[in-house]
Image (tube, grey):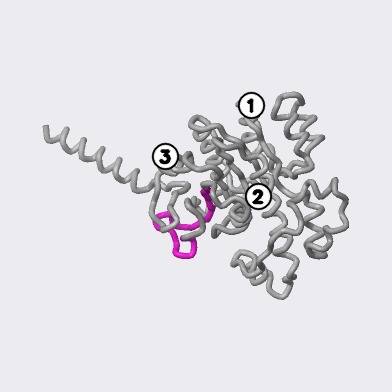
Amino acid sequence: MMQRFFALLGCLLLVQGGLAQQKPAYRIFDAKGRKVSYGKMVGQLAQRDIVLFGEYHNNPIIHWLQLITTRDLGQQRSIILGAEMFEADNQEGLTRYVEGTTDAKTFGDEVRLWNNHKTDYEPLVRYAREQKRPFIATNIPRRYASLVARGGFEALDTLPASVKAWIAPLPIPYVDTLPGYRNMLTMMGSHASPNLPRAQAIKDATMAHFILRHYTPGSLFLHFNGTYHSDGYEGILWYLKQTNPALRYATIATVTQNDLGKLLPDHRGRADFIICVDANMTTTY
């Protein structure tokens, strides 16, 4: 009898020791730094009209979470997908692929795809294709954002109307004192140019413009973008609220930490939900 007791005790100690060694790849926190379950996050997102899912472009955990979140929300709501990774002038090629009228090779020929598209974004596009859900190319064509980075908003004035159709209506409102834009100048130091945050702003404004253009009442628009484009409730969200403050918005931010036990104070308040990924996580590029 005692032998059985000690054998059982040994097994329990081994299990407890194994659990103590478990290292989660991520944890979810709310804006105040309180831990939140994945199920609770999805339940709250399902009640919103537009969700901005901020990512680190090369983080595999975040891309996996984007896919499962999309699937789970798609079971509860009629969803529309959109992404920074696709530029507005490529909408027709993206739509043809999602609707199933072209194959993957034609899609790659017609649409400017990011280098990590196959591993990180193709699963989302494939989901839209399989579920027959719209996928919106929301970003300004890169070459026109580059014009702003070099010459300011004025560089867009001489563009033909056909090109301006791929950009938010001009002139866009712009507040250079917003912390996100101001911090860009601080981070760049002596290399900073006042046009750098303006180039960011024209992207934010354009993504907001195409999100609202394609949003339909009763649906949920799930948008994927670099986390800096929506951190601190600024960027895309700021422009969305300038046009339609009545919609119900939610934001997700991505951060990394060595210790996932507690969200660092600097990360609190970045978004409604903050996904904290182990800083040692491997990257996709």
Q: Nearer the viewer, residue 247 or 42?
A: 247
Amino acid type of the residue tagged 2 in the rendering:
Ala
Could you say which quadrant of the image residue 90 lies in?
Answer: top right
Distance from the alpha carbon under mark 2 to that under mark 1:
23 Å
What residue did someone put label 1 on?
A: 132
What residue did someone put label 3 on?
A: 39
**Residue at the (81%, 50%) spot, across then down:** 164
What residue did someone put label 2 on?
A: 208
Q: Earlier in the sequence, mark 1 or mark 3?
A: 3
Task: Return the x and y of residue 285 as percentages of the image width and height.
Answer: 66, 48
| Residues at marks 2 and 1 touching, judged by CB atoms closer than 8 Å | no
Q: Nearer the viewer, residue 246 or 162?
A: 246
- As displayed, is residue 186 above or below residue 252? below
| Residues at marks 1 and 3 touching, judged by CB atoms closer than 8 Å | no
Quarter the N terminus occupies: top left
Q: Residue furthest top?
A: 101
Distance from the alpha carbon under mark 1 to that under mark 3:
25 Å
267 in the magenta segment: yes
Task: Return the x and y of residue 224 as percentages of the image width and height.
Answer: 61, 45
- As displayed, is residue 14 above or below residue 267? above
> Viewed as shown, does residue 115 lie left or right of 55?
right
Mark in the foreground, 2 or 1 = 2
Amino acid type of the residue tagged 1 in the rendering:
Lys
The span shown in magenta is: 249-268
Q: Nearer the viewer, residue 125 or 145?
A: 145
